[in-house]
Amino acid sequence: MFSESAIYSTIQCRGCDDVKMRLVEGGSHSDETISYYPPATFRRKPKWMGELLLESIMDGIHKTLVELLSEVYKAMQNGMPRLAAMGVRALLESVMTDKVGDKGTFAQNLDAFATEGHISNRQKERIAKVLDAGSAVIHRAHLPTTNDVIAMVDLAENLIESIYFHDAQIDEVAKTVPARPVFRKVKSRR
């Protein structure tokens, strides 16, 4: 005879007052499993995410980036690597089309993105590999590992930070750098 049980509980942390639901499942032919909803945070959001969120109030691309990044983090947190990989693919496409317009295909967008100087040739190769991993999930039933998805998200976060934040940050650094001294050329007497 086969039996199965599911016990739901609402629990609250005595330290931070966080409330979660706990599900304890078990059966006569399986081990007991315990799940928490929402699950523990998988990855801390980057420090610039708050700035991106503030800018999202003002324009569409920042809103799209915030929404896509949030969905990717949720997919990672909930053990959905395929959805996270597809989200990274969409995120990269959004960044490229924001900067160079939609050229028709991923390859054409990536070429234009590199040609206009937003990325180096090495970065272009990396982005192409990440785009292919996202496409493989959709078209070739690929299941990326957690480490694969982490690497893809690392690349996407670094690209967003570089494209949307580094120019302003470096401009601020440049304002604090003292000017080079000016030297006069002295004519030699012969």
Image: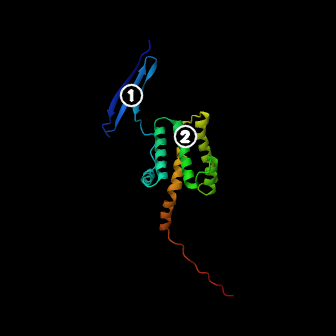
Query: Tag 2: residue type?
Result: Met
Question: Given contact means CB atoms under 8 Å apart, are the residues at marks 2 and 1 in contact?
Answer: no
Disc 1 is placed on an element classified as strand
Horizontal and vertical percent position of residue 187:
64, 84
| Residue tagged 1 | 23
Residue 110 versus residue 146 in the image, above or below: below
Front in this rendered view, residue 51 or 155: 51
Closest to the observer, 85 or 40: 85
* Residue linked to disc 2: 86
Residue sitting at 53 percent across and 55 percent down?
Answer: 163
Question: Horizontal and vertical percent for residue 73?
Answer: 47, 42
Q: Amino acid at mark 1?
A: Leu
Which quadrant holds residue 9?
A: top left
Crowd tier of the residue under label 1, counting other residues whose Cα lies within 10 Å: few below 14, some 14–19, many 20 or above: some
Residue with the most extreme top position: 1
Q: Nearer the viewer, residue 124 or 139?
A: 139
Instruction: Name the quadrant of the C terminus.
Output: bottom right
Q: Earlier in the sequence, mark 2 or mark 1?
A: 1
- Identify the residue shown where x is 56% and y is 47%: 93
Q: Report how far apart the C-alphas of labels 2 and 1 lie in the structure.
A: 29 Å
Tell me the SS state at disc 2. helix
Q: Position of residue 97 (x, y in %)?
A: 56, 51
Number of numbered discs overlaid on the protein picture:
2
Q: Which mark is residue 78?
A: none
Q: Nearer the viewer, mark 2 or mark 1?
A: 2
Residue 51 drawn at (x, y percent):
43, 54
Q: Residue at x 39, y 28 (%)?
A: 23
The residue lying furthest to the bottom in this view is 190
Q: Image height check: is 70 above or below 139?
A: below
